Image (cartoon, rainbow, N blue to C red):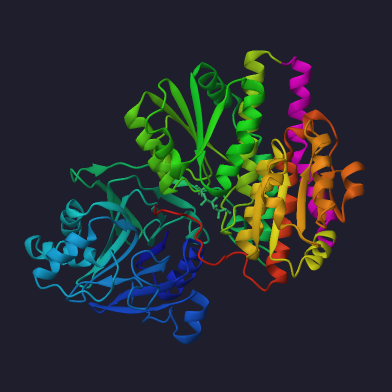
Amino acid sequence: MCGIFGIITNQDISVGKIVFEGIRRLEYRGYDSCGIVSLTDSQLIVKKDSGKIDDIQKRIDLSDFPLSSKIALAHTRWATHGPPTKENSHPHLDCTSKIAVVHNGIIDNFIELREELSSNGHVFKSDTDTEVIPHLIEEFMKQNNNDLKGSLREALKKIKGSYALAACYAEDPESIIVARKESPLVIGIEEGKTTYCASDIPAFLPLTRSCYIMNDNEIAVLKSGEVEFFDRKTGQFIEKELQLIEWSIDAAEKGGYDHFMLKEIYEDPMALMRTMKISQRELSLLAHMLWSADNIYITAAGTSFYASLAGKFIITKFLGKYIHAIECSEFKNQLENSLKDNAIIIALSQSGETIDTIEAIRWAKKKKNIKIITVTNVVGSSLTRYSDKVIVTQAGPEIGVAATKTYVTQVLTLALIALEIAKLRRIETPEEIEKYYNALKSTPQIIEKFLNENVELINEIVKTLEKSVNFFFLARGISIATAKEGGLKLKEVACRFIEGYSAAHAKHGPISLVREGFPIIFVAPPDETYQRLIGNVMEFKSRGGKIISLVAEDDTKIANLSDMVIRIPQPSDKYHNIFSPITFTPALQLLAYYASISSNLDPDKPLNLSKTVTVH
Ligand code: M6R
């Protein structure tokens, strides 16, 4: 939920400026406050405040530290324990102000630890759970000959919860100690010169492409241009493989776009093309697993959940088995007494760090004989550690808080599995399957054409809706997933209230809200639900609703009933219709983006949100 970044170097470079830029690249993880600590001449210098990094920078120069500093740690916070104030900002120090810690995660037993430490004379300055860590380390330093690594290991034995943390000690200018459990942490290295630690690879990508991914319960000692890994519990040395990151730096930066969200919408086609290349062998393995399972569940949160709703629909069409789609936070509540054996859970998560998704599968695995298939965008993320099979979508790093390109790649991945199932079961002829494949392969071109030709139209629609605060997004069948996802985007980035709903069900209550000019967006691909949807459009139109329809290129019927029409340049055939969540959703992503801009909001940093939700 927060971002951490650290550097240790033997080079004549400004560590202040480097960590400042590094932590800025992690601001998508939280932007309630920011802080940096650097070690100079056996002293820790701390600069921190509440607010977004650029706003703080206008008040104090966060990057200005003496050039003799060779160590710095930085943190960007998404508030959980205590309000977003300067006092609650990281880094946090111990009583002697010699130990500094930045932390992402939650210390579940911090109240007990705080009471214990307070009764031993420790004085706390913040409301945070994190502050117990430097004080606990301080306790153990006395017994461990001021050895930071040993003391941190002792401290972590007492801590219950999750953490990615980095610590430094004023008397040790030669090392930073980091540790990981259930929160992401990666190490970047320029051999012999500089070592970095960060919550996410893009933070150090402009500086190095060589990295190590830390696993749960590992500790690492970072020295200038060197790193050593140890098992937290046994203290044993761990050999680790250096990985070369091939993402372009460009992919991790904004490129020429005003916002990450816009850049990432325009990356939908490329992300799909890369994801199309997922190995056939892997897909076929998953198809076999699903085919032999007695029960299948699919679980996720937010956008990933809406991708699950679309994917469930596509897989069911070819698999012929019901798939239970359950929001991850409700998974245990709903299945406590009915979870079935010989089951498979498909868990979807862009980040692979959503705690409710992780908890759902961990709970299920403990309870029954269950296999987990994870679809994620992040290699080595926590979710992958609890999974039997992992498929990595190839969207590349997604920085905008609103998920966009990762949604289309998630649906594509599930669609690719569905087509493998169709092959396995031989329920379609090879020629038919080929046609479905060709339709899937054409999705990047369809989206690219749409994005290139419709910006003006989308802005025109945004303008006519400028004053509207309430919307319905309605659809039938598979498009309910598109309506919900499109509605969520507008909600998140443009601060409007949206009900993403079944068009048929909407007349059992929601329709009573409709007055003259009430905006209703109908998602209307020409599939088997189309004829009935016409009736729903008429019901809302006759009550004064302003109808905006999202239709296929050659549509006439619903288009003629609409006040405004968005046309997706795709053929009207069954092969394309089943994949409409992929081709129709980018139009709604673009609508949300421009609605956010026209409301003077920052689409990359929606209010109260964080890219990765690691609290329950
Ligand atoms: O990383 P995940 O896919 O597990 O995240 C799930 C949701 O938190 C996420 O999709 C959220 O709803 C986004 N802000 C949607 O744009």
Q: Is residue 582 above or below residue 456?
A: above
Count of picture labels: 0
List the single residue furthest toward the bottom. 59
Which image quarter: residue 468? Answer: bottom right
Picture coordinates of residue 398 (x, y %)? Answer: 57, 54
Q: Magenta region, mostly helix, strand or loop?
A: helix
Picture coordinates of residue 144 (x, y %)? Answer: 10, 60
Picture coordinates of residue 566 (x, y %)? Answer: 83, 51
Q: Is residue 616 visible?
A: yes
Q: Is residue 452 magenta?
A: yes
The residue drawn where x is 22% and y is 47% is: 232
Q: Is residue 583 above or below residue 82?
A: above
The residue drawn where x is 75% and y is 57% is: 514
Q: Is residue 586 magenta?
A: no
Q: Is residue 555 visible?
A: no
Q: Nearer the viewer, residue 497 or 342?
A: 497
Q: Which quarter of the image is occupied by the N terminus? A: bottom left
Picture coordinates of residue 235 (x, y %)? Answer: 19, 46
| Left or right placement of residue 58 versus residue 99 in this view | right
The residue drawn where x is 62% and y is 25% is: 316
Which image quarter: residue 569? Answer: top right
| Left or right placement of residue 434 versus residue 291 in this view | right
Highlighted magenta segment, given as a residue range: 428-456
| Left or right placement of residue 475 versus residue 146 in this view | right
Which image quarter: residue 434? Answer: top right
Q: Nearer the viewer, residue 275 or 349?
A: 349
Q: Is residue 429 above or below residue 182?
A: above
